[in-house]
Image: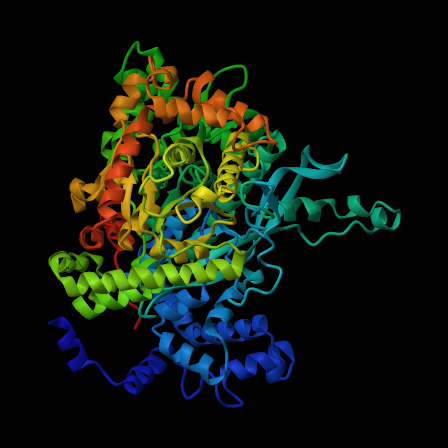
Amino acid sequence: MSTTKTAATAPTRSDGLAKLRRQYGAGPIDLTGIENALYERHLLFDNVIELGAARPREQFEAIARSMRDILSQRWVLTDQTYERANPKRVYYLSLEFLIGRSLANNVTNLLLDPLAKQAAKQKGLDWVELLEQEPDAGLGNGGLGRLAACFLDSMATMQLPAMGYGLRYEYGMFRQTIQDGWQQEQADNWLRRPDPWEVGRPYEQVEIKLPCSFEMRGGALRAVIGKPSSLIGIPFDRPVVGYGGKTINTLRLWSAAAPDYFDFHRFSGGDFIGALAETLSAETLTRVLYPDDSTSMGQGLRFVQEYFLVACSLADLVRRFRRTNSDWSALPERAAIQLNDTHPTLAVPELMRILLDEAHLGWDQAWDLTRRTLAYTNHTLLPEALEKWPLEWFEALLPRQLEIIYEINRRLLDDVRARFPGDDGRVARTSLIEEGPSKHVRMANLAIVGSHSTNGVAEIHSKLLRQKTVKDLADMFPERFSNKTNGVTPRRWLLLSNPALAGAITEALGDGWITDLAELEGLRPLADDKHFRGQFADAKRQAKVRFAEWLKVTSGQEADPDTIFDCQIKRIHEYKRQLLNALRIVVLYNRMRANPRLAIAPRTFFFAGKAAPAYHLAKVIIKFINDLAATIDGDPAMEGRIKVLFLPEYCVTLAERLIPASDVSNQISTAGYEASGTSNVKFMMNGALTIGTRDGATIEMAQEAGEENFFLFGLSAQEVAESQGWYNPHWHYDNDPETRAALDLIFSGHFSRNETGVPQTLRDTLLTHGDHYMHLADLRSYLTADQKLVQLYGNRDAWARIAVLNVASSGKFSSDRTIAQYAADIWQAKPCPVP
């Protein structure tokens, strides 16, 4: 077996550490243990304290900075290699990078896990407590940002010359707490303490000139048209460590600042706020991720955020390009710019502005270079999520870019009229400008027209994108559309998050799967091996116990690892249908109330996810789930049978612990609405079984593992679309007794005794307003699939067999595979190994 071969040829531990020392250029310097070791020096010289007086946070910072010291020479060498080789570089622009914590991930990818843990043990440090000192970086929210983080990991591991560009949000999105069942938003001040990973680069700052300025008026920031101003983008770099530590790429985050300016006369006259207005307006720009867009001011701030990201990043990458390339026509051969969703779409007119106004190229050449350099990933089929910005904002803030958009649109519509004469409807739908009382720029249309590639993120998503969402543009440019099904990095989401299962896999297959997840296919015959099934069950048990202990310590909530862990962890949204899951639980609750002797497998239902601050219905859903949890907890007849837990402050760290512990993964979006999903893949990779609809990447997951090893239910995307015109939820209320009983119990206020608005809002959503996302249409099918799932769990050996088959079938869903497809099909980028 491969394990025997690996053991026979493996170097000794000291040989391996010596090799890593040479690779990282660390020389004779020790991590810890002597006076001049990295850890001791950082504690003493950074914090000016005695070693014995250091608190856990200071110990964490010293360890993290020591690890950054070890990787720094390799980080510099990576950049030097790229400068010297002048390869085609990939620039990944994203408004989100949900990277989570960095210490454990970097230690793992540097192959220094044994050394770090040995050093911690030597100093009497609690390694787990050290890891808990690091906050999750407040740089993202959901799947979009987590995907971006996985892609960066894969690009570095595959030695692709790549760089991520984002914004350095001071407060992230928000920290979610629950009070009386309701979501409360608090500031997520994740940068309160120094971040040991980031490196400020003030000398590489970028100046962004705007034709307007801002002032404080009535306690709010207002634009002052006709008074030019500048924003300063200050870059902060974070290392992106590829597995094996050979390539260390960079994530560059921009922080907004004002030019050095202070109105002394206004300040000395008592106008303290006015004297700092420019500074306040600039720094507000990167204060939070996704400002509340229920107001025009919040929307305007997000619009400026997007331009700031694009303008800073393009100025920086063009500056880098020009250092080693004098010919502008070489830009598409030296730079591939990937737009992660519509947020960075302003790159189209901004790159055109640079090529026209600064490089002084002609329109045709500038347009050719722009399109060949840019590529766009679409992440949504929801029309409201395809951004449209008011034309008046362009007129006030970006008039030159608007001129360019008008010219792009004029030429586009001339082509449409030539190819489809007399089709005025097509012209209107294709236009970059949405007409109406208030005109808007359609950012998705602009991204598609201004790039050479548009990809979806799952086969069904890409199909619906072409056939429905942007059909007219797909008809115009069919060669630009492709699919790149999402994946996740197995380093963080299996090797690091699930050490027991990762160890069992490595013992069986060797460690090649860490960088080639397709090797998990070798587990397929082991699904019928009793010994391996036992190892799998032991690993799952360890993960459940570990999660339950962590949850008790960090939140005070209790979960019994002897119950089925049944999970739905996602951003709270109607189409993701947390409400459908809650309806399932109410039906089960009713069954047990009607028959107290009903045999049922003990189960804990976990929910986690944030609702956008202005999304009232999503907040009501959270409230109802918490009311449901409290009611079940208060019913003695339910004790030891079912329990509901809403886990506040869902983040990468929570997911890293809950996903390996989960038995059941709920992927129950209304078919045709979920682009892909990434949590679905993580659950599968860690051996949870999926109960879900035929939507997003779940369809492909079931194809890989076999539908007989999934619990699929509900309407298909086609059936959902065809029934929209006639669907009536009242039919299900009138004809399904369990559905009616569950809804009547909810509407009676049984779960929300002091919140009369909650039952009424749910009645309006599910009945009065037509149940747009078809919860009731899929409820009976969901319950049937759930019953089959519970029956299978009764045969633990059969359950383990199917779970192992799921893990064996997850190889396709590595982000390494996805990135290899991007590199070959879209970027034409090749590895650039660092010597």
**Hey, which quadrant is residue 299 in on the image?**
top right
* Scheme by which the image is coloured: rainbow
Visible residue check, residue 50: yes
Judge whether 329 appears above or below 389 on screen.
Answer: below
Judge whether 179 appears above or below 39 on screen.
Answer: above
**Hey, which quadrant is residue 251 in on the image?**
bottom left
What number of labels is visible? 0
**Residue occupying the far top of the picture:** 422
Judge whether 230 appears above or below 653 on screen.
Answer: above
Q: Nearer the viewer, residue 225 or 797?
A: 797
Q: Identify the residue at horizontal 58%, vertical 36% (top origin).
A: 292
Q: Nearer the viewer, residue 220 or 117?
A: 117
Residue 693 x, y percent position in the rendering: 28, 34
In what quadrant of the picture does the N terminus appear? Answer: bottom left
Q: Identify the residue at horizontal 42%, vertical 73% (top origin).
A: 71
Residue 296 x, y percent position in the rendering: 61, 29
Residue 508 x, y percent position in the rendering: 17, 67
In what quadrant of the picture does the C terminus appear? Answer: bottom left
Residue 794 x, y percent position in the rendering: 24, 48
Q: Nearer the viewer, residue 644 or 239?
A: 644
**Residue occupying the far right of the picture:** 269
**Residue occupying the far front of the picture:** 597
Q: Identify the residue at horizontal 37%, vertical 27% (top origin).
A: 775
Q: Nearer the viewer, residue 338 or 124?
A: 124
